[in-house]
Image (spheres, rainbow, N blue to C red):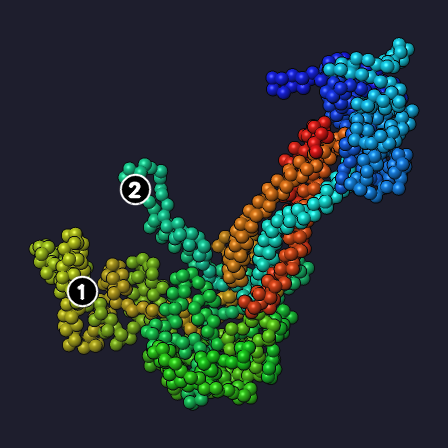
Amino acid sequence: MLKLSNIKKDYITGSTKVEALKGVNLSFRKAEFVSVLGQSGCGKTTLLNIIGGLDKYSSGDLFINGVSTKHFKSRDWDNYRNHSVGFVFQSYNLIPHQSVLQNVELALSLSGVSRKERKRRAKEALEMVGLGDQLRKKPSEMSGGQMQRVAIARAIVNNPDIILADEPTGALDTETSVQVMEILKEISKERLVIMVTHNPELAEKYSTRIIRMLDGLVTSDSKPLTTEEMQEFEPKNEKPKNTKRQKMPSMSLFTSFSLSLKNLFTKKGRTILTSFAGSIGIIGIALIFAVSQGMTTYIDMVQEDTLASYPITLENQSMDISSLLETFIGTAHSGKNHEKDAVYQKSMVYDMLNALNSAETNKNDLKSFKTYLENQLADDIENPELKQAINGVSYTYDFDLLVYTENIDGSIIRSDSEELMQEVLLEHFGMDMTTIVDMGASSGMSKNMMPMGSMKLWQEMLSGKDGSLISPLIKDQYDMVYGSWPNDYNEIVLVLDKNNELDDMALYSLGLKTKEEIDKLTKAAIKQENIEYDNVSWSYEEICDREFRVILNSDCYTYDKKNKVYKDLRETKTGLKYLYDNGISLKVTGIIRPNEDAVSTMLTGSIAYTKDLTEFVVEKAHKSKAIKEQKSNKDTDIFTNLPFSENSTNLTDRQKQKEFKKYLNSLDKKEKAETYVKIKCVPKTEDVDKFVDDTIKDKKRKDIEEILLPVLSSQTGMSEKEIKEYLSSMKDKDLEDIYSTILEEQYKMQYAKGVMAQLAVMPEDMKATALDQEKSDYTVKECALYYDEVLEFSESSYDSNMRELGYVKLDTPSTINLYATTFEDKDIIEAAIKEYNNGVEELSKISYTDYVGIMMSSITTIINAITYVLIAFVAVSLIVSSIMIGVITLISVQERTKEIGILRAIGASKRNVSTMFNAETVIIGFTSGALGVIITYLLCIPINLILHKLTGIGNLNAILPLPVAIVLVIISVLLTMLSGLIPSRSAAKKDPVIALRTE
């Protein structure tokens, strides 16, 4: 039962107040046909909207089945409209893009009825109103009477308690009106039907009760409830518990998407254009990512291929340049905060020198690491991953492999392009390889990265993990074009390039070109003259017949008994011929060439040998007489018979006295005589100081400048005018210091000249005897002075001599190269190095060089940076398209305002309305994303053709991975959904009464 208790409704617009209802008191039976009559504007429709829950009363109360609605929330009204009320409107209010059946089903969808049950009940309702054969038609294909019957079917399909009909016959002809009234009369037998109408005839004929209204008040009621009927109705002031037992109406996502999709299909042109506009940003980002991904994939592939050529390198000496560069780039830093009112000091010299000091070369203990590495590789159980990750290990040692061959002109030459380059640079440019190496070292470059670092002709090949002489990596990169791979220590292979060519320096080193031919090429290059090369070739057999011989470094030196030093036999042609004839013969067994699929190759030299040759030469060198002699005399240079200066660096005066007397006792008669003269030529320090002081004290500044003028002019080559300006700018003390130094040197020279003249007539025996008599009287201070002034020292050192002799230990390599196949394997190797460093002291930690990382990481970083910048630019178009979609969604909201009112009238909640428009933006977003991805895949085809044409790289392709494509579609959906939040929210807030009136 329905009861209205003193219902009032006021409409306030600004300061104007309109009373639509002025206190209506009505009660309705559960089943009757009530007609409400009255003039336009008397409040009939307002009353109907309040009863239907579309509009809220200003005061009073509305009781539904005895329950007050004062405490109803929005969801309670939605539930009430969906389950208890059915609306029949004068203008039908059908959703145009839905079929007849779907329009009727809509209320059931909100009730959560299953699809099968929904269709059954909707068909029954349509059959009840005589439209069982019109299920698939759209409202636009039906007459007014048919559409009104569809509206009635929609109203009764959910089996509501109340049917509210607002002017149901107002837009119909008489015949159709009668049909509609008959249907309503039949419905009123089981439920309450309240109809608002202007037609009193129809009301009198079909209604069981007529209520008349005027100016917001009920003026008459033909059949009000009796006292007994009123007593049955007992209002209860409580919250609507009964409604909670019913399932709250809620539109499913499927229904929301279905409504939105069908609405979009009604505007195909706009939908397609909107989706395409939204896809432009996705296309831009997708194409940028595809090209970037293709480049990154290509770089990764190149990195994988170059890992064999650029292994992880551990050198016995390394320098961390990064911190040094940071210091120099930073230049200087301010020491303290201060006002900007004067000139202040900031630190620069200290920072630079401190950085240089901190960046000094660090030594790696490769001996210990080699032991650790070999133990790890030998233990399959403890670290199987490392053994699997390392594809090869090579050790290099700090000695030159001396290989000689006979040139075609008959001379014996060193088979080494570095030595040839040394000669060319020295002869034509006035500099040598040492200068270039020093330049590279000063810039922090490793030997492998220095200019001409790849000019080494002879190179050791990587051995296999299983102990084989040749690693499978080498065999994978190179094809054997003639002969076979080495099987013994004295077998070698020649390495050609992909065109079967060798450069002219390599040909000279192989003995196939003369020095005169190289000089001719060099001079032509200096003069910038064009030169024509002869098309000369050599058969494989000729190359393999070439003879090469290894001469041990230590065998080059033989003992000279007369001078008590070791002399280099290579200084004479005869000596070199003797060494060559007795050298270790090498045989060329094969000729190899990089295969066509190799992106990068491991060997940079032109002749490759095995590790067995290295080990053979090292072990044989240990038996050398020269090496044994130098090892037994670590303080004396066997090449000069002089002591090493490195041993005298930090000696005290007492230690110098001891060393000097030891030196005197080792001399023969002739050497004693020569040493006696040298000692006597050293003036006493006191005498030198007295001479300098006496000479300076009487000199004026002008006199000193006149004396220094010709001396400094001859020494510096500057003009007298420039010297005068320079001297005049000096302080007095600085001027005296320069003059004192010159006087000191002059005095020593004159003193020595006089002593040598006096002792020239003295016999050798007397000089030797005089030294023996006087040496015991030398004081500690005098011995220290004579040690510094008389003794001669070798310019070499013990270590450099041992290197010259080719002495190395196999357990102490100068470089360790660790080869990996993949970057994952490289990471495992780096982790093993880190683990080793964690277990040793700070000074024993190993630093290493990752050449691939150095070369390629910056390229990847640059590509990523460019990609991000381009994506940022293209993202602007995404934002613009999102805003556009938001505007279009807002327009859609305006176009579908009546549909919003219809949905709210049949029980759809605000959230349902919002979800419906969100579904529309999601559909557009998905369409835009999918369209963008599909277009990108199509555009990748011509882009790849262009990339291949421009770069010449066949495996450089723009690639859009499927996961990225999916992510881009999701991003498109999210952006469009975000852009539609405000329009969907505004749609949800629309007043259903106003929405229903919108055309």
How many numbered discs?
2
Mark 2 / mark 1, whichever is N-terminal: 2
Q: Secondary structure at mark 1?
A: loop
The residue where tag 2 is placed is: 344
Residue 588 in picture, x, y percent from top left: 55, 83
- Residue at left offset 62%, top offset 48%: 278
| Number of residues whose C-alpha sits closer than 10 Å to that of mark 1, classed few (under 14), some (14–19) or many (20 or more) | few
Q: Secondary structure at mark 2?
A: loop
Q: Answer above or below: position of 235 versus 568.
A: above
Q: Answer above or below: position of 162 versus 308.
A: above
Out of 417 and 666, give the one closest to the viewer. Answer: 417
Out of 517 and 13, give the one closest to the viewer. Answer: 13
- Residue at left offset 51%, top offset 78%: 606
**Is 123 situated left or right of 525 in this image?**
right
Residue 662 in picture, x, y percent from top left: 32, 67
Quarter of the image holding residue 228? top right
Say whether marks 2 and 1 touch (CB < 8 Å). no
**Is 438 situated left or right of 124 in this image?**
left
> For the C terminus, which image quadrant?
top right
**Is 77 situated left or right of 784 in this image?**
right
- Residue at left offset 73%, top offset 13%: 22
Quarter of the image holding residue 837? bottom right
What residue type is disc 2 on?
Tyr
Any part of residue 289 in sight:
no
- Residue at left offset 66%, top offset 46%: 270
> For the N terminus, which image quadrant?
top right
Measured in 3D between alpha carbons, the distance from the residue under mark 2 to the one under mark 1, in whole angstroms, is: 37 Å
Residue 611 in picture, x, y percent from top left: 56, 74
| Number of residues whose C-alpha sits closer than 10 Å to that of mark 2, classed few (under 14), some (14–19) or many (20 or more) | few
What residue type is disc 1 on?
Met
The residue where tag 1 is placed is: 718
Residue 876 in picture, x, y percent from top left: 55, 47
